[in-house]
Every structure is written in C-alpha cells, then in structure tokens.
C-alpha cells in the first residue's frame, strides 16, 4: 500500500511537469493538497525601442518605464544593477501564497515572533484575522507582521516559504532577484528595476493581487476582538492621481531608500509599468514616478 501511494505521488509530480509546458494554469490534487503548476508565460522587454531625444532627469538610483501592452522599454537608468527592494518583496510573497492555493478564509493569530523588528503595525500580538485580511494588510498597508503570519500559515516556517519564493524566481528566470525573508526588511532581498517590472507583470496576472493593489483602502476585521476593525490604506499614493492604478507596491528600508513599482492606465487606455528605486524621499518617489509616467505617455 505505501508503494502504491508513492507511485501515485510520482505520477502526479510527472503530470505537473508536463502541464508546466502548457499555456494555461492547472491545479492538481495531491495527497498533501492542491498543487499549482505555473503557466508557461515569460515576459520579455524590447530595449531597442527606447526613444531618442531628451529624457526626464530624475533623482533616483535606478528606474525603468515599460509599455505594458507591447513590452517596449521607454526609459532606463541602471536598470540591471541589483539593489535592495524592501517591501516590493511582498509581491512575490503574495504570489507564492496564491500558488499554494491556501484557504484565505482560514484565520491566523499574530505572534510575538511576527512582531519582532516589524516596524510600526496596527496588528497587535494576539489579533486573529483571516488570511485574506492579512493579505490586504501586507499588500495595501505593507504590514510586515501580516507577511510573516501569512508565510507561516502557508508553509509552516519562514525558511520553507523563502525557499519557495526563490524557486519561483528561478522558474521565471529572474537571475538577479533573491530573497532571505518575506517582508523586505532584510537588505539582502535584492532585484533590479528590470526584473521588478517583470515581477509586477507576473503579479498582475493574479486576479486577487490586481484587486487588492488597485484599491485605496480596506476595512479588515479582527476576528477575536468584538467590533474591532482596522482600516488599511494603500501606501501607493499614485492611487490618488489622475491615473488609474492597476497594480503596484511601495517599499522602504534605509538600505533601499524609497521605492515604487506601479502599473498605471491613462484615459485613452494606454498602460505603463513604472519602477523607481533608490529615491531619496517618501513623497519624492511619487513625484518622480508621475513625472516619468507623464513623459512616457507622451511617447506612446
């Protein structure tokens, strides 16, 4: 009987590898739960399309601007230089959670370990929330405690979760992106502006990530505290601009300075992916991103 179960597991794993070469997303049921084989979809950018002429002078370490609809690169600055990306990390955290197909109606309690070196948070130790609300807290309000609780709920340990994050980057051929934990607090979590733009494109393929990161705020309920709700506001202030935000994520630690990746749409339906890394100011990153996007829309 054990041999039969082992044979079944091997056949399912083989099927997963076969499905990986298809152009769709497949869900396979294994003895351990749902296994999702990623779609065979790889984003490639056209760097030969960068327009000539005067470009905006921006105060930042690296950046890229891409026409989302055709992959044409409009602007780059040090786009392939690895840098800490801080909480932009959480885009990959969210993808791994959704890849695992976890039940988002389950709940998880914030622990003291979650709260360790987590910066400011409205999630107090002992608060119990659904995984869906924790995902909103992590993606909208960039809450580090939420990200740690989600990693634990998904894989049992941070180490196992991070292993899946890096495995996903390897599958997507993002060679300059590496993670050491799921929040972005570790300066060793690095990527490039080029690869961050691709990460955002992959994240945008997830319906729930699109929904969460395009909202302005969310009222999250603390399950084990009567009548206690927490409003999580989107840290991507481009949501308050004249452009429609389709997705995005902010990030900041001292080593990274201020960062932003966002996918925006103008009134004509044109879409641009903008990444700005290493901006020396909180509000400045949004001003520089808007300047870059405004210039970009004049070129498409």
Image (cartoon, grey):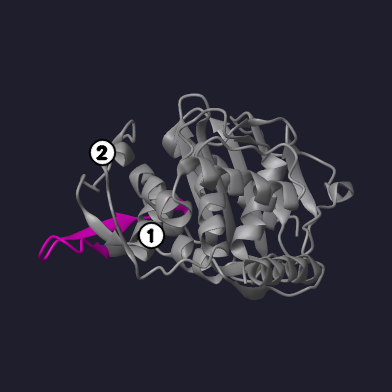
Q: Residue furthest top?
A: 255
- As helix, strand or loop, the secondary structure at mark 2 comes to helix
Magenta-drawn segment:
220-238
Mark 1, residues whose alpha carbon is within 10 Å: few (<14), some, or many (≥20)? Answer: many
Q: Nearer the viewer, residue 117 or 159?
A: 159
Question: Which dot marks residue 112?
Answer: 2
> Does residue 235 appear anywhere in the picture?
no
Horizontal side of residue 104 vs 37, given as left or right: left
- As helix, strand or loop, the secondary structure at mark 1 comes to helix
Question: Which dot marks residue 136?
Answer: 1
Q: Residue at x 41, y 57 (%)?
A: 240
Q: Residue at x 63, y 28 (%)?
A: 61
Measured Cα–Cα span from mark 2 to mark 1: 20 Å
Q: Residue at x 67, y 65 (%)?
A: 6
Residue 182 part of the magenta-drawn span: no
- Count up the numbered dots: 2
In percent of width and height, residue 152 lies at 41, 49
Q: Nearer the viewer, mark 2 or mark 1?
A: 2
In percent of width and height, residue 4 lies at 67, 72
Horizontal side of residue 119 vs 290, given as left or right: left
In the figure, residue 212 lies in which quadrant?
Answer: bottom left
Which sits earlier in the primary sequence, circle 2 or circle 1?
2
Quarter of the image with the N terminus is: bottom right
Q: Residue at x 55, y 35 (%)?
A: 180
Quarter of the image with the C terminus is: bottom right
In percent of width and height, residue 265 lies at 59, 65
Residue 204 higher or lower than 253, as above or below = below
Horizontal side of residue 214 vs 188, given as left or right: left
């Amino acid at each position: 009987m054990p041999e039969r179960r082992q044979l079944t597991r091997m056949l399912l794993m083989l099927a997963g590898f076969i499905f990986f070469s298809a152009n769709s997303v497949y869900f396979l049921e294994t003895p351990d739960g749902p296994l999702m084989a990623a779609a065979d979809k790889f984003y490639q950018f056209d760097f030969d399309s960068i327009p000539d002429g005067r470009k905006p002078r921006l105060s930042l370490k690296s950046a890229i601007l891409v026409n989302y609809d055709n992959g044409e690169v409009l602007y780059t600055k040090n786009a392939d230089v690895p840098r800490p990306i801080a909480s932009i990390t959480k885009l990959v955290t969210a993808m791994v959670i959704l890849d695992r197909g976890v039940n988002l109606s389950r709940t998880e309690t914030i622990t003291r370990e979650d709260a360790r070196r987590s910066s400011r948070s409205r999630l107090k130790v002992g608060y119990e929330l659904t995984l869906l609300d924790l995902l909103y807290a992590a993606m909208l309000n960039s809450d580090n405690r939420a990200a740690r609780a989600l990693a634990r709920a998904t894989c049992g340990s941070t180490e196992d979760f991070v292993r899946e994050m890096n495995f996903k980057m390897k599958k997507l051929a993002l060679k300059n992106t590496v993670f050491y934990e799921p929040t972005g607090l570790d300066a060793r979590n690095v990527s490039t502006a080029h690869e961050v733009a691709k990460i955002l494109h992959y994240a945008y393929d997830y319906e729930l990530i699109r929904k969460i990161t395009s909202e302005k705020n969310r009222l999250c309920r603390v399950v084990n505290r009567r009548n206690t709700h927490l409003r999580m506001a989107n840290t991507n202030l481009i949501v308050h601009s004249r452009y429609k935000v389709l997705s995005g994520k902010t990030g900041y630690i001292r080593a990274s300075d201020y960062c932003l990746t966002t996918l925006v749409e103008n009134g004509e339906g044109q879409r641009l992916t903008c990444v700005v890394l290493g901006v020396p100011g909180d509000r400045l990153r949004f001003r520089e991103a808007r300047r870059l996007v405004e210039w970009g829309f004049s070129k498409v």
